[in-house]
Image: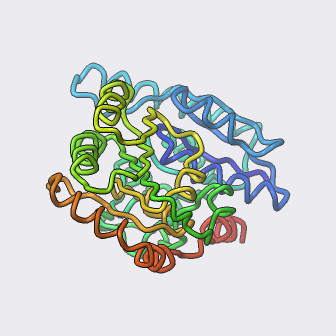
């Protein structure tokens, strides 16, 4: 069966799409993946062997400038027309879209040719692109049992599948915590700044300085955090990007970060104790919590075991799409 996977925008859209693409390819289906320029390299690096990657012309419409918004819509429209023409020749049997502006052209083209189309929503609140394109799809697959912000009227069937993760996370599922006082700090676009302010100060105020910290931050903050940790004699590895996040989580005793959908599911898949930080935490609260947990390794082990959840999302999505 020919299956078209539509993704792009951010890793949060791309990585679940690649997990499903790999599952479908392993079942013998012929896979084509469309993505925007922003994620082109990411897709090429993780696409299953034998699949085709198609670049589309698209960008987000969230800019404040009305002119930029109109230009972004124009690009999406041009890409939709291009895919309508392309589908005359390629004519996929299914289209599976993973949200974001880059998925809209493929969903619309599939609607024009009446190709069965499936959406996947990664978050607990439906995104704007998915909410817009739901009028054209057969099935919405969700990461969580309930999703807020759903359209009041929709003919799409809603199926809870979970959020797919890459095979390296599945391979690390259920591994024991290393018991090496290793703290992993990871923040997304919303939460990176508060983590940069709170966590280093909290670790510096702890009596036990034998903690090793791996800290992912924005590129502009790397040097500042390296200097802070060095001045306080804290062993730390500060990075602007962690390429192998599965290994980073597996090698940590405790993870502290924001509660993005991908982060939560990745922690559940491997099984790790975590502190998911609200925006109003302060260094004293963080230091107290870290001290309590690192002084009680048995509790960390129990937290890790309780967090473990089997992830069969890629298989469930593949079953839903192909049945």
Inspect this view and state whether residue 138 appears.
no
Q: Which of the 4 image quarters holds residue 293?
A: bottom left
Q: Is residue 221 left or right of residue 9?
A: left
Q: Which of the 4 image quarters holds residue 64?
A: top left
Where residue 259 appears, as percent x and y from the top left, is 34, 58
Where residue 319 appears, as percent x and y from the top left, is 69, 71
Please report the residue visible at 48 percent of the width from the left and 48 percent of the height from the top: 12
Say which of 92 and 160 sits in front.
160
Say which of 313 and 256 sits in front.
256
Where residue 273 appears, as percent x and y from the top left, is 43, 68
Decide: is 36 above or below 16.
Answer: above
Please report the residue visible at 23 percent of the width from the left and 58 percent of the height from the top: 287
Where residue 120 appears, as percent x and y from the top left, is 51, 59
Please report the residue visible at 33 percent of the width from the left and 40 percent of the height from the top: 189
Say which of 24 and 294 sits in front.
294
Inspect this view and state whether residue 241 appears.
yes
- Quadrant of the snapshot with the C terminus: bottom right
């Amino acid at each position: 069966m020919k299956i078209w996977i539509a993704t792009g925008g951010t890793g949060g859209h791309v990585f679940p799409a690649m997990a499903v693409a790999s599952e479908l390819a392993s079942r013998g289906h012929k896979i084509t993946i469309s993505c925007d320029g922003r994620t082109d390299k990411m897709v090429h690096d993780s696409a299953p062997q034998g699949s085709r990657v198609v670049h589309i012309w698209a960008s987000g419409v969230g800019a404040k400038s009305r002119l930029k918004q109109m230009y972004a819509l124009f690009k999406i429209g041009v890409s939709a027309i291009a895919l309508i023409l392309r589908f005359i020749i390629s004519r996929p049997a299914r289209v599976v879209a993973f949200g974001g502006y880059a998925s809209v052209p493929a969903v619309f083209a599939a609607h024009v040719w009446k190709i069965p189309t499936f959406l996947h929503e990664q978050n607990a609140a439906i995104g704007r692109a998915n909410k817009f394109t739901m009028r054209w799809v057969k099935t919405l697959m969700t990461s969580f049992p309930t999703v807020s912000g759903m359209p009041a009227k929709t003919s799409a069937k809603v199926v809870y599948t979970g959020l797919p993760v890459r095979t390296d996370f599945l391979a690390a599922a259920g591994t024991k915590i290393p018991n090496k006082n290793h703290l992993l700090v990871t923040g997304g676009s919303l939460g990176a700044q508060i983590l940069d302010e709170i966590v280093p100060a909290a670790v510096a105020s702890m009596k036990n300085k034998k903690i090793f910290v791996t800290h992912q931050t924005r590129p502009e903050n790397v040097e500042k955090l390296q200097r802070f940790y060095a001045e306080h004699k804290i062993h730390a590895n500060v990075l602007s990007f962690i390429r192998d996040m599965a290994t980073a989580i597996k090698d940590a005793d405790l993870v502290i970060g924001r509660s993005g959908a991908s982060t939560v599911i990745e922690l559940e898949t491997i099984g790790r104790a975590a502190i998911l930080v609200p925006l109003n935490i302060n260094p004293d609260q963080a230091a107290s919590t870290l001290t309590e947990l690192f002084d009680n390794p048995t509790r960390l082990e129990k937290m890790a075991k309780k967090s473990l959840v089997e992830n069969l999302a890629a298989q469930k999505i593949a079953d839903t799409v192909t049945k």
